[in-house]
Image: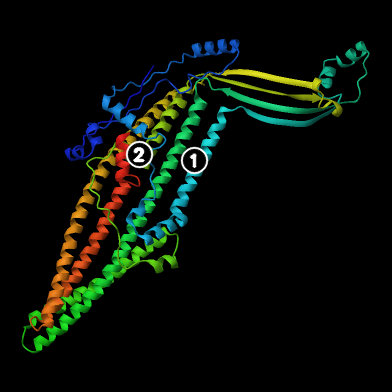
Amino acid sequence: MTMLALSTRHTLTRRCAKRLPIARKLQGVIIFCRWGRMTQGFDRVESIPIRIMFALAAGALLAGCSIPFSQLPPTPEPAVELQDQVAASEVDGFPQPLAWWESFADPVLNQVVEAVLETNFDLAQAVARVDQARARARIADAVVYPLVNPVAGIEDFDTPTNAGIGAQLDELGLGSELTEAFGITLPERLGLTTYTFGAEFAYEVDFWGRNRNTRLAAGAQQLASESDYVVARISVLAETVRTYLELVDLRRQRELAFENIEILGEREALAQSRYESGLIDALGLYAMRRALRDARAGLPQLEAGLAEAEARLWILLGGFRDDIDGSLPDALSIADSGEPVPAGIPADLLVQRPDVASARQRMEAARFALGVRRAELLPALSLSGSIGLQATDAGDWFDPDQWFRNLSVNLLGPAIQGSRLRDNVELAEAQLNEAAAAYGSSVVTAVNEVEAALAGLEAGRRRHDVLVSFLDEALAESGLQGERYSAGIGSYEEVLSAAQLLVGARAALSAAERDLGFSRLALHRALGGAWTADDIQYLSNE
């Protein structure tokens, strides 16, 4: 047994190793890829006659078909452990991603996402690519079956006697002598009509597994394409959720900007009155006017950002939607479960990421493709022939006694093509190494993206809590200043200042809610979809 082992070492940061159990297991993340045999087809040999087996063995011996395998350093034990973890995630009953966007508890967002799933053009393209991959897999499946073509026809032969073979006999001086010797008188023309009904067939015995590996490679590519569709689906939905959060926040920021401009307008008018009364100098008036101008100057930027976000949403929806536009809220109502961030994420949960699954299937496809290239170095055994009924009289066309058959067995050795066939093997080996490295990269990327998303979620929650407290204080101060002004103790300027502070606190909290939504979205995306504490507990018990 020959083995191809590929290992790629990666060093994780201490923080990642401290956070995730998988990181401790991946001290030097490696991808393990091994070959049990030269191809996948050696253990299944077609039943063929003994004489053909001898001929095939002789041809193989004469061809000198020994195929060297690339020897790579042995794979450390953690590599086998990681490979087993990844493979174990494909068992039945593994919790699949659900409608994860529903965890935001926003009915309008649910409506938007469902509309995107129905009308998005990028998803339609991804579905078409899956259909193409499935069609290619079905085409590849056909190579393992015999090729059978039905045949039905009529052949009419009519030629003059003095042409063809008759003319050649006359040229040799044998035509008339033969006919006279046998007492035969040839007609002026010879004719024959033949009726044929049957089938022609051809089949290549997949002794070395070339066709089988071709089929398996196409199947792996199909699975990779299906995973790519899930990648595209998550990407489109994540962009939809992100655009929705940004759009609603911009609508809220625009509303608060108008309130701020209104308050600053009152403060500017009050400053003008106080300046004219000699209570403040010109610098105080200019400062208030500058603040008002700055607020007004920022409004067009908000409008432009809002228009751009709306355009992105309509693109995701495949066009403008009146029903969606009319239902968009003016403030975020994103619910945060507030669940504590778990101490670790099992490896099986990371493997639900479709990009990891796609990379693994492409590595499998490259492995089977290498089997195809290696099988091309060996002789090929093919069977061909025909069987059916043949008669010269239409009445005997379907007479069972008129059956015929033709069978041929061919042993075809590799043509003399220089080093092309072996170069193809080396190319396939390099492509397998590339696919294995891409798979390793996807696993490492998944681990670190989850780590970053968890940290971002924690930071977002802390910032949100601080700004909630800030808003509570701003509300209290605004109410107190209003009471003081009503009692004749405070000034109207202090009331306006507190109101402006309250608007700023609301704007900051709206942005924090948006960013918290972004952080939760990043975690969903990093985990390939839904993630709950129940999933964590279930997978940990497996």
In the figure, residue 424 lies in which quadrant?
A: top left
Is disc 1 surrounded by few (<14), some (14 to 19) or many (20+) residues within 10 Å? many
Q: Foreground mark, 2 or 1?
A: 2
- 242 lies left or right of 386: left
Front residue of 286 and 469: 469
| Kind of residue at badge 1 | Ala
Does the image show residue 286?
A: no
Q: Residue at x 77, y 32 (%)?
A: 153
Looking at the picture, does residue 542 appear above or below residue 409? Answer: below
Looking at the picture, does residue 534 appear above or below residue 179? Answer: below
Q: How is the image coloured?
A: rainbow
Disc 1 secondary structure class: helix
Looking at the picture, does residue 416 appear above or below residue 343? Answer: above
Residue 356, which numbered label?
2
Q: Quadrant of the N terminus?
A: top left
Front residue of 487 and 239: 487
Image coordinates of residue 445 in percent, x first then y, are: 28, 41
Image coordinates of residue 311 in percent, x first then y, are: 38, 64
Residue 340, which numbered label?
none
Name the residue carrying label 1.
133
Image coordinates of residue 492 in percent, x first then y, are: 13, 82
Front residue of 8 and 454: 454
| Kind of residue at badge 2 | Val
> How far apart in space, not on screen, are marks 2 and 1 (Cα)?
18 Å
Q: Residue at x 23, y 38 (%)?
A: 20
Looking at the picture, does residue 66 appear above or below residue 83? Answer: above
